[in-house]
Image: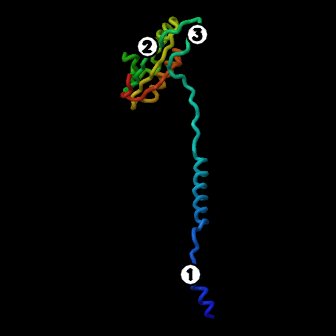
Amino acid sequence: MSSHKHRTVESDNVNLGFQIAPMIDVVFVIMLFFMVMAGAVKKEMELKSQLPGVAPASPDAPQEMPDEIIVGVEESGVVTLNEEEFDTPTDKKLPNFVATLKRLKQEADNRNAKVIVTIQAEEQAKYERVIDVLNGLAVARIANVTFTVGSDAGF
């Protein structure tokens, strides 16, 4: 019996050393976390838009510098073209605005120049009013459009 008692005392003092099994468990939990989160990542889709810039000149027709127009959309619904007010804030068709855009587009086409429009909308401007402006640009066949938001856009 004395030898049996000696074995239990000896097993209590045994150093088991570094345990690898808990470390493997931690690695598997971390790996599982990243695998689950990788499925939640959303892919960004490409938004095809034409940015303003100088187009390469064709050899047969010299290109003029592009005409840059700033269209403002204020919180009150007022639409401005190079700081000049057009139409009333409640007029959805914007007839004077569209007529002026058509005239500017025609003049630029006659000079072989591009028309670049920057829509500068105030932060609290209604989206519906911005859409009215975009519809007017579509009627005037102006495709080179960029956006800025807020009054701190530096021009």
Instruction: Give the quadrant of the C terminus.
Output: top left
Q: Does 36 sit above or below residue 103?
A: below
The secondary element bearing badge 1 is classed as: helix
The secondary element bearing badge 3 is classed as: loop
Q: Does 68 sit above or below residue 22?
A: above
Dot label at residue 58: 3
Q: Name the residue rendered at 59%, 5% in the picture.
A: 60
Q: Does 98 sit above or below residue 26?
A: above
The secondary element bearing badge 2 is classed as: helix
Q: Name the residue rendered at 47%, 19% in the picture.
A: 117
Disc 2 versus disc 3: distance between alpha carbons? 34 Å
Q: Which residue has dot 2 on it?
A: 96
What x and y, as percent, mark residue 101? 47, 13
Q: How many marks?
A: 3
In the image shown, does 84 or 145 lie closer to the viewer? Answer: 145
Q: Name the residue rendered at 56%, 14% in the picture.
A: 56
Please identify the quarter of the rendering in which residue 25 is found: bottom right
Disc 2 residue type (three-letter): Asn
Disc 3 residue type (three-letter): Ser
- Tell me the mark number nearer the camera, choosing from 2 and 3: 3
Dot label at residue 12: 1
* Disc nearer the start of the sequence (3/1): 1
Instruction: Give the left or right position of residue 153, taking residue 51 as reference.
Output: left
Instruction: Give the left or right position of residue 74, taking residue 66 as reference.
Output: left
